[in-house]
C-alpha cells in the first residue's frame, strides 16, 4: 500500500461480530491469544478504551509501543490498538517478517493528517526560498511515515513530547530556524520554555500558503510552526482552569503540551503522557488533580489511584474519537483472520520510506 494511506476505508467488519455479547467477545479474544501464543503481541496505546486495553500485552505511547513490538522477535503478528501513524511506525521498526495489523483501518489521527506530504513539500520550497539554507525540519512522532521520511531526507529528526526540549536544542545547533511539524502547540510551548519569544515564531498555513501570526520581523523568526493541532487537546481552555480554581483553590492543573499556549501557561504542570502518569503516581494521597488530556487515560488514572481526587479538566468528555474506533469486535475479527491464515488490515510501509524514517528516528535517539 502507499505509505501514509489507509488501504481501504470501507469497514468490512462482518456483521456477526457486532451481535456478540461482551462476555463472548472477551472469552474469544482470550482464547485466540492463548492459541496464538508467542506468535502474537497486542500493543495498546494509553488513550485506548478500557475494554480493549485489558487485552493488551503492553501499554504505552506510540513510539514506546512501536519499539516494544520490534523487540518481540518471536511475534510474527503485532496488533497495534492505536491509530494508523502508530502502526506505520511499528512497521518501520519491525523485522521484515513481522506483520503489523491495525484492527480498524479508519482509526486515523486528525493531527497527523493535517501535514500532508504534498503540502509539506510545497511549503519547503517556499520556506527555503525565503530563508535559504537556515531551516531544519523537525516532526513530532505523531506524524505519518511520509513526513518522517521527508524530515530524514532533509537533515532533520523526530521528537516526542518527552524529549522535544532536547531535540529542539540539537536542531538549533544545526540551523538558525526550525520548521516544526505537525503540532503547532507542542512546538510553541517547547520553544517558549527554551526562552524563544513568541515574536520569533510564525505559523505556516498550508491552506493559504502564507505565514500567519507574524508578530515581528520575518528575518528574526526562529520557529516556523505548521498549522496543525490535536483535536482532543484543543478542547481545553483557560476558562475551565479558572472555574475549577474558584471551586477548589487546592486543585492542581496538569496538562499535555499539545494544549494551546494559554492553557499551558495557566496550568501548574505540563508534560508528556508519561510525565502525567508519573506525576500522579508520585503524588501524595489526597492530592487533587484536574488533567487536560484524553479522557480514557484520565479515567484510568482515577481508577488506579483512588486515594487521590482525579478529574478531567473539561466538563465534557474529550475522547480521541479515532482511537475509539478500535473496539473488541474489530480486535476479535483480526485475531480470527490470523488464525484463519488470512490476516486483514495489514499496514505496510515501502522500503524507501522506512529507510528515511529510520534516519530521522535514529537522529532523535542519538540526541
Image (cartoon, grey):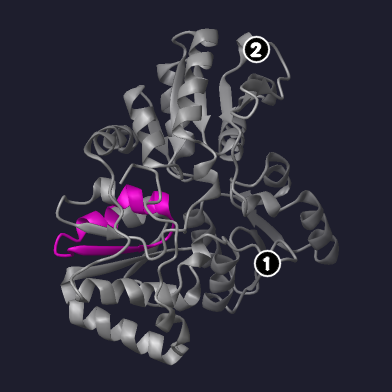
Residue 165's disc number: none
The residue indicated by pointer 1 is 317
Q: Relative to 41, is 212 above or below?
A: above
Q: In the rendered image, which quarter is residue 254 located in?
A: bottom right
**Which callout, 2 or 1, points at the residue further toward the start of the chain?**
2
Residue 335 at x, y = what percent? 29, 74
Q: In the image, which residues are magenta? A: 67-90
10 Å crowding of disc 2: few (<14), some (14-19), many (20+): some
Residue 255 at x, y = what percent? 63, 53
The residue indicated by pointer 2 is 218
Secondary structure beneath label 2: helix
Magenta span has 54? no
Q: Residue at x 47, y 58 (%)?
A: 107
Q: Relative to 25, is 160 above or below?
A: above
Secondary structure beneath label 1: loop
Q: In the rendered image, which quarter is residue 24 located in?
A: bottom left
Magenta span has 72? yes
Q: Relative to 170, is 81 above or below?
A: below
- Quarter of the picture holding the C terminus: top left
Q: Residue at x 65, y 62 (%)?
A: 318
Residue 155 at x, y = what percent? 35, 22
In-front residue for pair 264/210: 210
Amino acid at each position: 500500500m502507499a505509505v501514509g494511506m489507509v488501504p481501504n476505508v470501507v469497514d468490512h467488519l462482518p456483521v456477526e461480530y457486532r451481535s456478540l455479547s461482551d462476555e463472548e467477545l472477551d472469552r474469544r479474544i482470550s482464547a485466540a491469544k492463548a492459541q496464538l501464543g508467542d506468535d502474537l503481541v497486542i500493543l495498546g496505546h494509553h488513550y485506548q478504551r478500557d475494554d480493549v486495553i485489558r487485552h493488551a500485552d503492553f501499554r504505552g505511547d506510540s513510539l514506546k509501543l512501536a519499539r516494544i513490538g520490534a523487540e518481540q522477535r518471536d511475534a510474527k503478528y503485532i496488533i497495534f490498538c492505536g491509530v494508523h501513524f502508530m502502526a506505520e511506525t511499528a512497521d518501520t521498526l519491525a523485522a521484515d517478517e513481522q506483520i503489523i495489523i491495525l484492527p480498524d483501518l479508519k482509526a486515523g489521527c486528525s493531527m497527523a493528517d493535517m501535514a500532508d506530504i504534498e503540502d509539506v513539500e510545497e511549503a519547503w520550497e517556499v520556506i527555503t526560498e525565503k530563508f535559504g539554507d537556515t531551516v531544519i525540519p523537525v516532526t513530532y512522532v505523531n506524524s505519518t511515515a511520509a513526513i518522517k521520511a521527508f524530515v530524514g531526507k532533509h537533515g532533520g529528526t523526530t521528537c516526542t513530547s518527552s524529549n522535544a526540549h532536547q531535540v529542539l536544542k540539537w536542531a538549533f545547533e544545526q540551523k538558525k530556524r526550525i520548521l516544526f511539524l505537525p503540532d503547532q502547540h507542542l512546538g510553541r510551548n517547547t520553544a517558549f520554555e527554551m526562552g524563544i519569544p513568541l515574536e520569533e515564531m510564525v505559523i505556516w498555513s498550508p491552506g493559504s500558503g502564507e505565514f500567519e501570526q507574524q508578530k515581528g520581523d520575518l528575518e528574526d523568526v526562529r520557529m516556523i510552526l505548521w498549522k496543525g493541532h490535536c483535536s482532543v487537546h484543543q478542547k481545553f481552555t483557560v476558562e475551565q482552569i479558572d472555574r475549577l480554581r474558584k471551586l477548589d483553590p487546592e486543585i492542581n492543573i496538569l496538562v499535555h503540551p499539545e494544549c494551546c499556549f494559554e492553557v499551558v501557561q495557566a496550568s501548574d504542570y505540563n508534560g508528556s503522557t508519561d510525565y502525567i502518569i508519573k506525576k500522579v503516581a508520585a503524588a501524595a494521597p489526597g492530592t487533587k488533580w484536574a488533567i487536560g488530556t484524553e479522557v480514557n487515560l484520565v479515567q484510568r488514572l482515577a481508577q488506579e489511584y483512588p486515594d487521590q481526587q482525579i478529574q478531567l479538566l473539561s466538563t465534557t468528555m474529550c475522547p480521541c474519537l479515532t482511537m475509539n474506533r478500535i473496539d473488541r469486535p474489530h480486535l476479535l475479527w483480526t485475531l480470527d483472520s490470523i488464525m484463519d491464515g488470512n490476516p486483514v488490515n495489514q499496514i505496510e510501509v515501502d522500503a524507501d520510506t522506512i529507510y528515511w524514517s529510520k534516519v530521522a528516528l535514529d537522529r532523535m535517539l542519538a540526541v
